[in-house]
Amino acid sequence: MTAKLARTVAVANEKGGVGKTATVVNLGAALSMEGQKVLVVDMDPQGNTTSGFGLDSGRTGFSTYDLIMNPQKVSAKEAIISTAWPGIDLIPSHVDLAGAEIELIKEMGRENKLKKALAGIRTEYDVILLDTPPSLSLLTVNVFSFATEVLVPCQTQPYAFAALDNLFDTIATIKEDINPDIAITGIVATFYDKRTHVSQMIMEKLNTDKRCSHLVFKTVIRGNTTIAASNSVGQPVVFYKKNSYGSIDYIRLAREFLGRNGSEFILPEF
């Protein structure tokens, strides 16, 4: 019998400040509450996903930097650490990852370093969530080379909506040249505030734009100070304050996510 492979999901947006890291941390935690065994891979040199689980990226042993730059010495299993919550493991980031961009330029097969490092652990988890830098880089390309799904957080603000064009272009190029299996699972609206005209306008655009309307999750992540507070103490919001809007929204997102298996990616028309 063939072993079941984990869903490999890149959480990505080329614009910063859209709730990407919060989505990785809190969706991962919510999925664990739904009985999923989750591995979170922090590929952002800033290490905010790592600290979001209450861990210090400078004191966790091996990191994603070691997996990419020293694969002969460090295996994925050696880099995995347990979080304080059952069902969620983590491969932490490290500040050295920022330098990997330059180091990788000289490497053969540089876009597939992470894919090779993580290939052997896909049977160990139900979902592997990967955080990405807020820009297109070799680190992001490595994530897209490994992932078969992309989850896109989109802040309900005009600049975040406009940035989707660049992301669609990037994924289309990756699909054509590097990873034909990659697809967009969905776009999740973040920082939504129904009281503001801007949030309502961007939600309407997401739900009516022919490039992405079929990809938008019904669940929205409302603007909520509890999410920021939970991050500051290194706890996912679903464990920090279970009855908060942030907790409720991410649990709903987890359940909706489990009902999707990746959408057929159609090249956007401009």
Image (tube, rainbow, N blue to C red):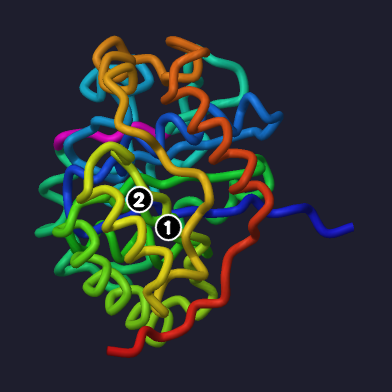
Using a 10 Å C-alpha cutoff, classify the residue at mark 1 as few (fewer than 14 neighbours), some (14 to 19) or many (20 or more). many
- Image position of 262 (left or right of 116): right
Q: Quadrant of the C terminus?
A: bottom left
Residue 92 colored magenta?
A: yes
Q: Position of residue 251 (x, y in %)?
A: 56, 31
Distance (Cα) linking label 1 and label 2? 6 Å
In this view of the protein, which residue sits in the foreground, 143 or 72?
143
- In magenta, the rendered stretch is 91-95
SS at circle 2: strand
Q: Is residue 226 magenta?
A: no
For this rendering, which residue is in front, 155 or 35?
155
The residue sitting at 41% across, 86% down in the picture is: 267
The x and y percentages for residue 33 are 63, 24
Residue 187 circle label: 1
Rendered residue at 51%/54% (across/down)? 217
Q: Name the residue that disc number 2 marks.
A: 153
Q: Is residue 41 left or right of residue 35?
A: left
Q: Residues within 10 Å of mark 2 (few under 14, many from 20)?
A: many
